[in-house]
Image (cartoon, grey):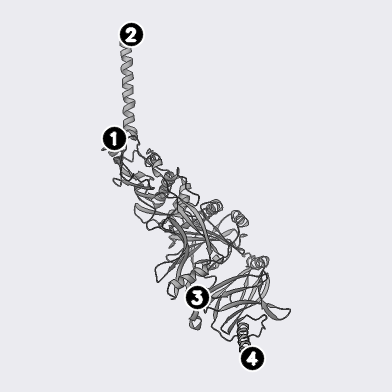
Amino acid sequence: MKKLVVLLLSAILCFSSMVSFAAPAVLNPSAQSTANNLIVITNPPSISSTTQKGIVFCGYGESGVNVTFYKYNPLTGLYYPMTSGGENISLGIVYQSGLFWKKIDFTAGNHKVIVYAEKDGRVQIVKREINVLSPGIADNLFDYTLNFRPAYK
Amino acid sequence: MKKESIKTLLLSALVVCSMVLTSQIWFNEKLWSSDYDFFSVFKDKFSFIFKGSDSDSLSIGDTGAFDSIFAPNTILLSSNTGRAVYDSSGGKGEEINLIINDIIKSALSSSVSQVEENEWKNAIKGTNVYADYHVPVSLTAIGTFLEAQITEKGSFESFDKILIDCEKLSNTIVPVYFRDSASNTHYRINTPFDKTALTELFASSSNALNLSYSFELGLDKKAEGEASKHQSVLLDSYILLSLDETPMNIIKEEPINVLDQTEHILKTFGYNIKTVRKFTQTNGTENFVDSKSTLVISPKGYIEYTAVSDTSGLQIGEDGHITTAAAGVASLIDRILSPFYLSSGTKLFISSPLVETGGNSHTLTFGYMFDAIKIISDSDDCVVTVTNGKITHLKLNIKNYFEAEQKAPTNVLDIIDKAYTKNSGTTLDIEDLSTGYVKYGSIYEKVWLVTTKSSSPIIIE
């Protein structure tokens, strides 16, 4: 009996530690960081507009940090793991050198992203807002500013 | 009377024959003696009379040969779908290089403005054609080659990178940027140019690659305060990072029997094959000697030409400009290599600056590339000294490379990580990150070369 209890407790402890290391299935917009120095995101900036569909998330961080990406769903008001080909988009574990990058494709429109960094139970949440413009809109914006003719030659 | 007529005729014939033979000896260099030769000395002293009559003079109008050495090592077409990379030596790369030359020619006659580095960086991020020559090129040299009029350019003397801003191809003016990496200065010239060629270029560009400059990703900025705790690697702003895997391979050198083409090489250097003196060493190396120069041809592909004096070298041009020297040397090398079946990936590239030094003597160096990737060598594969339009010394290793096998592709992040580990886990300030072929025994392996500010280059296989 004692052996069974010890075995059960060990199993619970093992699984609970796994649960605490796994990225959550859903993130609330109010989720908070418990650490603020796991990673530094150098690109993209906090809020950006671009015509490029592929955005490179990159930066540097503590070696061994696990990084995953979440995207905001305005219908539910929650963040869900970004997927590609049926699998969660993750850059995995940050290398020893600390550098990391991951290119993610977006459709045209506004996207709110959370970069979720986790190590040994410490969590850092970094938010990014990306506005992907369609090329036609970008061209119109430029033409609007350049179509004024000078009053003199 | 009849006898007298015959005698007269015979005598006349003899006189005419002797005159013809004498004129051949006087004016046909191939019949001149290979040792001390009055005619060679006479011709050199009165060379101004013989201008344009030297049959050994190489045509500097052979721009095809010069194009092969004055061409960017890297060409990028950037648009909002990504970046496409081209090698300037073939196909579309050649077509782009011609367009770049036309634009440079147009830009040289327009006025120039010095701009801040930020303007250059902003231009790189947009739609553009970018070319990296990897060696400094002076405006004078490029102007001579393109036969362009250069208006006053102030402090702008040379460049090694050019960027043609194609963000707004509907405008009539094209902004052309030039960068001088050595001094980190940037210039812009707004020049009129027919956009049709550029528009068609982008319409037909090949699949774009995932390439980003480190400054676009913010990986070139030194962090401060708490953020610097985990920053162990800093990248130079202009390192081009591939976010895809990089194919790796092994190449081998194919032996070339140079001695099969001895006669061709001798004729290229202007030797009279009937009168040149030949000595053969025990290792098979052949030495050729005449009154003006010596030529060594080794069975392993090594050629060395040495003139006995600065005035007796091989004439390749009429002036002492570096462009003349480079064009002439390019033509000569082209001719030397013409009968050898070199693989399409094997190319010689110029590794010395194309900048006027003010003197009449220039030393040009060349190295080999395979598929536009440098083959690292302890010494230059070709060194040529040109003085007053004459080649006075030339050393050339004729090599041919072919792909032997593919290796597993590599990921740049892995490479940086390995470099960091090899550097004993201390902070890495990377100036350059590129691939090259390094010799290991009988093979050449494609490796990564990580150049840092503080330590010797790190090689990652």
Q: Residue furthest bottom?
A: A2
SS under mark 3: loop
Of badges 1 and 2, nearer the viewer stands: 1
The lab-note entry on whether marks 1 and 3 share a chain reads: no
Under mark 2, the amino acid is Lys
B244 w.r.t. B315: above or below: below
Of badges 3 and 2, nearer the viewer stands: 3
Instruction: Output the chain of dot 1.
Output: B
The lab-note entry on whether marks 3 and 4 share a chain reads: yes
Residue A49 visible in the picture: yes
Q: Which mark is residue B33?
A: 1
The lab-note entry on whether marks 4 and 2 share a chain reads: no
Q: Quadrant of residue A54?
A: bottom right
Q: Quadrant of residue A125?
A: bottom right
Of badges 1 and 3, nearer the viewer stands: 3
B188 or A8: nearer the viewer: A8
Horizontal placement of B73 versus B170: left or right?
left
Instruction: Output the chain of dot 3.
Output: A
Q: Earlier in the sequence, mark 1 or mark 2?
A: 2
Q: Which mark is residue A1?
A: 4
Picture mark count: 4
The lab-note entry on whether marks 3 and 2 share a chain reads: no
SS under mark 1: loop
The residue carrying pointer 3 sits among few (fewer than 14), some (14 to 19) or many (20 or more) residues within 10 Å by Cα, namely many
Q: Quadrant of residue B312?
A: top left
Q: Are marks 1 and 3 in contact (CB under 8 Å)?
A: no
Instruction: Output the chain of dot 2.
Output: B
Under mark 4, the amino acid is Met
Residue linked to disc 2: B2
Residue linked to disc 3: A96
